[in-house]
Image: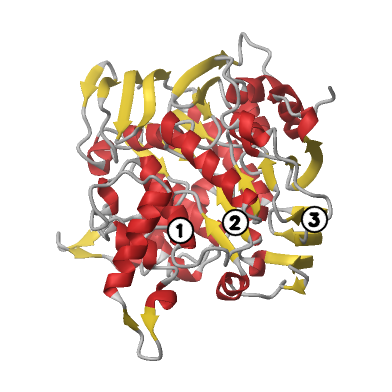
């Protein structure tokens, strides 16, 4: 059974997530979908699995047009998803999760626990014979790798005709990873259609019969293993190279900035490493904008986040404004003057049903409270919110407007504003992760200007982004990551898209 997406478009408020994308996933084939963060992979998976409805376009299964009302509807049509985030029920056992919705019953109505355990174990032995998992334990008590295997088994238990695997091997140990690779090949040979989303490009090349490349919500490439000689460099070029000839946003302003070489060192790391990153020797000074680039999974996002969350580091030294902070908590780093503007802002930064005022004040609430009573000065809170709305040109009818009603660009400005709320000059380091994710062109330029202005006022700024043009436009230096390590430092005079791609691909120029 094949599944065809024809002209799929998904428009979110202020963001075109998918733009006229057409893909055919054929039975008995493995179809890879690749692209950097923000390319549209998550939206595509959500539409395929019934979690999101497209704005326009059609979805056909076995030649018949279908419209999924929800994920249950997708499963009913034979489409099963193994999500990147995981969707197990934490308080149920591994066996109960695998058989969920298809449990054996006694007397027509009562679930049979022993039968559930036996069926789950037999099913696990069939697909992962070399992996031993305690399926009688709650899944929230199991290692994450075991949870991922259980989620794969659960997806297979409902006998899908189309299996979607979203970054399935990202957290798996080598043995389980090899088992899954072999399983993918076996399932495709039985006639199952498989969609594989992965940031491991060699994995995609080795496993997939066809590969679709997405960039900025558009389909920019389609390759077949039978007819195309596919290489990692070719895929990287398709994912990252823009063909519109546009100049980097913010270029004119950033090119005129020359941070002083004798400025105070804000960040000083030496051999700083965590589970997914390792940085040898790096100093970041006041007034600098440092760009971090790399393929998804290269470690640049994890390193950036560790500057605000040092406990994610496992070895090496990290000095913040001259103080050792390797064991500092997030609260400690905030007190010392570090700020994080994360990606996925509606999950990690804001509460959608709260007002602009409430979201802005969540970080600086102590600065507008009556101490030691802890009472909020409501008038001061409103005045400060209105000041930030004006300073950052946030387009909203009122500071009482709910965050969910704002455009993507204005939400992002609120995410920045809360760190400036009643605390100008308090923060010495700003870490941005995907700062213009889901933001329109006009708002993107304003956010770039805001980032540069923070450096102009004396802060050190670190920006990790999948948009190479964005990094070129706002950065003074760029650190390219490859395989979890800082592979190359690129000075501003050497900026070019080709240089960036070569640096993160490990190719010589």
Residue 172 appears in the rendering: no
Q: Residue at x 38, y 35 (%)?
A: 43
Mark closest to the chain's N terminus, 1 or 3 = 1
Q: How far apart are marks 3 and 2 (CA)?
A: 15 Å
Camera-side residue: 308 or 142?
308
Residue 221 at what x, y percent from top left? 54, 16
Tell me the crowding category of disc 1: few under 14, some 14 to 19, or many 20 or more residues within 10 angstroms, Cα based: some
Residue 204 at what x, y percent from top left? 60, 30
Residue 227's place in the image compared with 109, above or below, is above
Camera-side residue: 361 or 225?
361
Mark closest to the chain's N terminus, 1 or 2 = 1
The mark found on residue 58 in the picture is: none
Single out the mark in the foreground, 1 or 3: 3
The mark found on residue 121 in the picture is: 1
| Mark 3 in CB contact with mark 2 (< 8 angstroms) | no
Q: Residue at x 25, y 33 (%)?
A: 53
Outermost residue, left direction?
108
Classify mark 2: helix, strand or loop.
Answer: strand
Q: Which residue is drawn at 69% across and 75% down?
A: 327
Q: Residue at x 59, y 25 (%)?
A: 239
The mark found on residue 283 in the picture is: 3
Tell me the crowding category of disc 2: few under 14, some 14 to 19, or many 20 or more residues within 10 angstroms, Cα based: many
Residue 19 at what x, y percent from top left? 38, 21
On the image, numbered disc 2 is attached to which residue? 430
Residue 276's place in the image compared with 311, above or below, is above
| Mark 1 in CB contact with mark 3 (< 8 angstroms) | no
Classify mark 1: helix, strand or loop.
Answer: helix
Residue 169's place in the image compared with 234, above or below, is below
Q: Distance between the residues labelled 1 and 3?
A: 52 Å
Q: In which quarter of the image is residue 489?
A: top right
Viewport quadrant of the N terminus = top left
Viewport quadrant of the C terminus = top right
């Amino acid at each position: 059974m094949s599944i065809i997406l024809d002209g799929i478009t998904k428009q979110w408020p202020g963001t075109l997530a998918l733009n006229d994308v057409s893909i055919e996933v054929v039975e008995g084939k493995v179809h890879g979908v690749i692209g950097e963060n923000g390319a549209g992979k998550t939206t595509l998976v959500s539409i395929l699995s019934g979690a999101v409805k497209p704005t326009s376009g059609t979805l056909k299964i076995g030649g018949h047009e279908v419209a999924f009302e929800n994920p249950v509807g997708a499963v009913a049509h034979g489409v099963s998803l193994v999500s990147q985030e995981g969707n197990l029920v934490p308080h149920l056992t591994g066996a109960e999760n695998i058989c969920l919705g298809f449990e054996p019953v006694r007397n027509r109505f009562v679930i049979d626990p022993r039968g559930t355990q036996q069926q789950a174990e037999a099913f696990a032995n069939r697909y992962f014979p070399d992996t031993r998992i305690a399926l009688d334990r709650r899944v929230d008590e199991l290692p994450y790798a075991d949870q991922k295997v259980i989620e794969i088994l659960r997806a297979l238990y409902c006998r899908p005709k189309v299996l979607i695997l979203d970054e399935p091997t990202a957290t798996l140990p080598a043995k389980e990873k090899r088992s899954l690779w072999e399983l993918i090949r076996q399932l495709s040979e039985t006639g199952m259609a498989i969609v594989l989303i992965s940031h491991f490009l060699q994995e995609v090349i080795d496993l997939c019969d066809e590969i679709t490349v997405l960039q900025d919500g558009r389909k920019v490439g389609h390759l077949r293993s039978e007819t195309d000689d596919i290489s990692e460099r070719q895929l990287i070029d398709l994912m990252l190279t823009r063909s519109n000839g546009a100049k980097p946003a913010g270029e004119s302003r950033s090119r005129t900035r020359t941070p002083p070489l004798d400025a105070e060192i804000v960040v000083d790391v030496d051999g700083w490493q965590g589970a997914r990153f390792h940085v040898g020797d790096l100093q970041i000074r006041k007034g600098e904008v440092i760009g971090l680039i790399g393929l998804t999974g290269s470690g640049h996002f994890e390193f950036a986040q560790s500057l605000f969350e040092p406990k994610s580091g496992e070895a090496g030294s990290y000095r913040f404004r001259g103080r050792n902070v390797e064991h500092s908590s997030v609260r400690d780093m905030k007190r010392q003057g570090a700020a994080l503007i994360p990606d996925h802002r509606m999950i990690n930064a804001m509460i959608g049903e709260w007002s602009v005022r409430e979201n802005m004040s969540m970080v600086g609430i102590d600065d507008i409270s009556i101490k030691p009573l802890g009472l909020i000065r409501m008038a001061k809170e409103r005045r400060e919110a209105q000041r930030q709305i004006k300073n950052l040109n946030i387009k909203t009818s009122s500071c009482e407007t709910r965050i969910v009603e704002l455009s993507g660009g204005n939400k992002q400005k609120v995410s920045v504003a809360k760190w400036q709320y009643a605390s100008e000059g308090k923060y010495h380091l700003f870490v941005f992760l995907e700062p213009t994710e889901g933001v329109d062109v006009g708002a993107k330029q304003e956010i770039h200007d805001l980032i540069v202005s923070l450096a102009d006022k004396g802060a050190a700024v670190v920006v990790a982004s999948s948009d190479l043009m964005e990094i070129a436009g706002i950065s003074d230096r760029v650190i390219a990551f490859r395989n979890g390590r800082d592979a190359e430092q690129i000075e501003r005079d050497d900026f070019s898209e080709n240089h960036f791609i070569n640096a993160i691909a490990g190719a010589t120029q």
